[in-house]
Image (cartoon, helix red, strand yellow):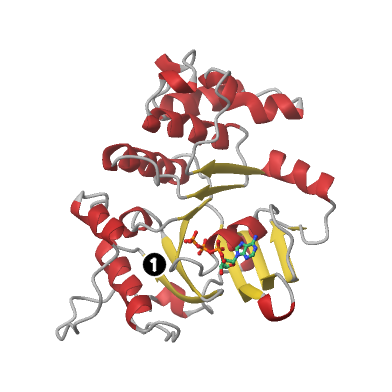
């Protein structure tokens, strides 16, 4: 475990650096014998001004965690804060306003309005809120995302990568405290995916934004500063300065130790000198590595 990570429990950072946090976050679906415990008393801190990726096997609770942190879903127990605001217990109206004013969202399917052009889509959340965009910031975001000559195009006139760039600009436009991105590269080819990941990285490095991204792709996760690994509704590991190879290795352990999780003593393991037979990596994850989505690391 890296020095910084070793100083804290998994997923925990210093409170003053925290954009969002949860304590004892528990989410159960259903009741009685059919209850599914999607999140099991999760403690997590999302570091401000950082890019955090959330990974884990299918059904491990990634989307549920994102939805609960973003106030899109209610919790069964525990507390969630956005900055200093405790969002657990807020009424639906207050949550709607908080999401609109303080959170940006990106989804796998872009979620653009087909009848609006790019710039109208970008400013839509602010238009709904009756707020005027900060023109200087908006122009900076538009230029950073290379959308200047696409502003009058409707989504159908844009490529998938361009549409996701519009969604990225929409998420950034109000300068939110936090951007949640759920599989933002899931519908993109590797080149467009790489571009979007580069923009998210720039949003953190150049614009000081905070990004949380759920992904299945180790190459995408490698763009983050920190990867949180979920297993059976708990944060079971984390990795600072991830590489695609190290993330893929960590994910393989979920396959080989199905249902049993151990704390990883070394978040950036080197090549395993005694590789076991282990299952093949998920073909999508392998493709991502083959296609070179992983960024260069110094
Ligand atoms: N609305 C729901 N009703 C019942 N069970 C649900 C609901 N949403 C999620 N679950 C269950 O909660 C668990 C966690 O689901 P979640 O979607 O958060 O996992 P995930 O890690 O995002 O999965 P994936 O990678 O497949 O998207 C799963 O067992 C899932 O079946």
Can the viewer see residue 298 in this picture?
no
How many neighbours does mark 1 have within 10 angstroms: few (below 14), some (14-19), or many (20 or more)? some
Per the image, label 1 sits on a secondary structure element best described as strand
Q: Residue at x 39, y 25 (%)?
A: 146
From the viewer's perspective, tell me whether residue 142 is left or right of residue 268: right
Which quadrant is home to the C terminus?
A: bottom left
Q: Position of residue 77 (x, y in %)?
A: 75, 73
Q: Name the side, left or right, on which 175 lies relative to 76.
A: left
* Residue drawn at point x = 53 percent, y = 63 percent: 62
Q: Nearer the viewer, residue 39 or 174?
A: 39
Percent coordinates x, y for residue 98 in the rendering: 74, 45
Which quadrant of the structure image shows residue 13? Answer: bottom right
Of 148 and 274, nearer the camera is 274
- Which residue is at the front of the view, 58 or 243? 58
Ligand 1 position by quadrant: bottom right
Where in the figure is residue 255, as x and y percent of width and height?
35, 76
Instruction: Please give the name of the residue rendered at 35% of the width and 63% of the height, measured from the top-left corner.
Output: 241
Instruction: Name the residue at 59% across, 20% down.
Output: 120
Which residue carries the number 1 mark?
A: 240
Q: Give the quarter of the figure containing the N terminus.
A: bottom left
Residue 90 in which image quadrant = bottom right
């Amino acid at each position: 475990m890296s020095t910084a990570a070793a100083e804290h429990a998994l997923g925990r950072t210093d409170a003053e650096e925290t954009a969002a946090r949860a304590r004892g976050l528990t989410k159960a679906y259903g009741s009685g014998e059919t209850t599914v415990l999607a999140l099991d008393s999760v403690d997590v801190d999302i570091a401000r001004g950082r890019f955090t990726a959330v990974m884990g096997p299918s059904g491990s609770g990634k989307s549920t965690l994102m939805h609960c942190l973003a106030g899109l879903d209610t919790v069964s127990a525990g507390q969630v804060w956005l900055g200093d605001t405790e969002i657990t217990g807020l009424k639906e109206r207050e949550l709607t306003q908080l999401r609109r004013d303080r959170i940006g969202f990106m989804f796998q399917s872009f979620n653009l309005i087909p009848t609006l052009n790019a710039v109208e889509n970008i400013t839509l959340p602010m238009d709904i809120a009756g707020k005027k965009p900060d023109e200087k910031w908006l122009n900076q975001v538009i230029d950073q995302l290379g959308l200047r000559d696409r502003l009058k195009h409707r989504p159908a006139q844009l490529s998938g990568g361009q549409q996701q760039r519009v969604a990225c600009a929409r998420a950034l436009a109000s300068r939110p405290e936090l951007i949640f991105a759920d599989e933002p590269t899931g519908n993109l080819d590797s080149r467009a995916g790489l571009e979007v990941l580069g923009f998210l990285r720039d949003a953190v490095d150049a614009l000081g934004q905070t990004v949380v991204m759920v992904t299945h792709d180790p190459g995408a996760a490698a763009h983050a500063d920190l990867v949180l690994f979920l297993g059976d509704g708990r944060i079971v590991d984390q990795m600072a300065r991830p590489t695609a190879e190290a993330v893929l290795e960590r994910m393989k352990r979920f396959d080989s130790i199905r249902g049993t999780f151990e704390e990883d003593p070394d978040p950036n393991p080197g090549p395993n000198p005694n590789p076991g037979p282990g299952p093949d990596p998920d073909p999508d994850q392998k493709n991502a590595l083959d296609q070179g989505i992983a960024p260069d690391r110094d």
